[in-house]
Image (cartoon, coloured by chain):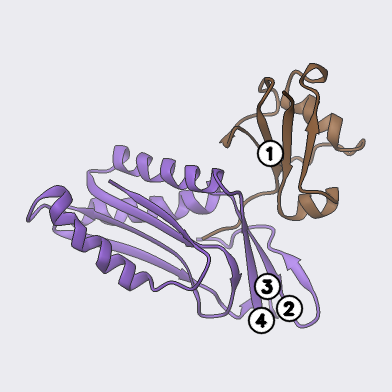
Chain colours: A purple, B brown
Amino acid sequence: MPIVTLFEKPFDPYAELGAYEATLIEQHGEGQYGATTSFVGSMRDFNEGDNVSAMFLEHYPGMTEKALGKICEQAMKDFPIIDCVALHRVGEIKPNDSIVLVAAWSAHRAAAFDACRFLIEKLKSDAPFWKKESLNETTRWVEKNTKG
Amino acid sequence: MAIKVLFFASLRESMGRAADELDASDVETVTDVWDAVAGGNAMPSNLLMAINQDYVNADARVEDGDEVAFFPPVTGG
């Protein structure tokens, strides 16, 4: 069963990945997956040519979780994967903090890679999150995603 | 009952408020809701909108008790 989680404090995506992977045997039985793919997005200290000292990630409580759940459901339908997750930070974020983890498990690598790419691209286009960057003396809303 | 209207991110700041409430008898569609709350501002072409936390188009019908949200393009991940 895919999980989605929002973190208000810094989280360790690799610890979360390992912890969830440890539940897969119980959920799906032994020896079910041969491929794990994951994408971790973290905060840069530069954007559009400016230094960025911090960021606030706003979200829409309720809809954000619902949207992430739908994206995971879609991935489960469209790709032959056995499970996936979508975890995301919200609130005040510092450079190097992890922002997002998506991961997929499947029997073979192609489906896991494809599903992982789908998860992050769909999350970036659909999930209600908005980044506001703190520059030296000002703040600005990020208006669009950088090209994948 | 009424229709609850929510604004997020840069739109919340330009609207000067995070939420609003409308009498459901005054509006039929999401566009009507926008017109009722936006103070004469045209709907931005890239505006996203949702009813009860699902994306909809501007011509979607609203009902008493709905939560309608307006927000700019999303930038998570």
Q: Name the residue under label 4.
A: A53
Question: Which amino acid lies under the numbered mark 2 shown in the image of this protein?
Answer: Leu
Contact? badges 3 and 4 (CB < 8 Å): no
Question: How far, Cα to Cα, is label 4 from label 1?
Answer: 30 Å
Chain for numbered disc 3: A
Question: How far, Cα to Cα, is label 2 from label 3?
Answer: 11 Å
Expressed as whole percent of the image width and height from the top left, the position of residue A124 reads: 52, 54
Picture quadrant where residue A102 is located: bottom left
Question: Which amino acid lies under the numbered mark 1 shown in the image of this protein?
Answer: Ala
Question: How far, Cα to Cα, is label 3 from label 4?
Answer: 13 Å
Labels 2 and 4 in the same subunit: yes
Q: Name the residue under label 3.
A: A48
Is residue B38 found left or right of A52 in the rendered image?
right
- Residue at 37% from the left image edge and 70% from the top image edge: A13
Label 3 or label 4, whichever lies nearer to me, is 4
- Residue at 56% from the left image edge and 77% from the top image edge: A44
Chain for numbered disc 4: A
Q: Residues within 10 Å of mark 1 (few under 14, many from 20)?
A: many
Labels 4 and 1 in the same subunit: no
Question: How far, Cα to Cα, is label 2 from label 4?
Answer: 6 Å
Is residue B27 found left or right of A123 in the rendered image?
right
Q: Is A63 rendered above or below residue A48? A: above
Expressed as whole percent of the image width and height from the top left, the position of residue A65 reads: 49, 47
- Residue at 42% from the left image edge and 59% from the top image edge: A87
Picture quadrant where residue A5 is located: bottom left
Expressed as whole percent of the image width and height from the top left, the position of residue A12 reads: 39, 74
Q: Is B51 rendered above or below residue A50? A: above
Question: Which amino acid lies under the numbered mark 3 shown in the image of this protein?
Answer: Glu
Q: Name the residue under label 2.
A: A135
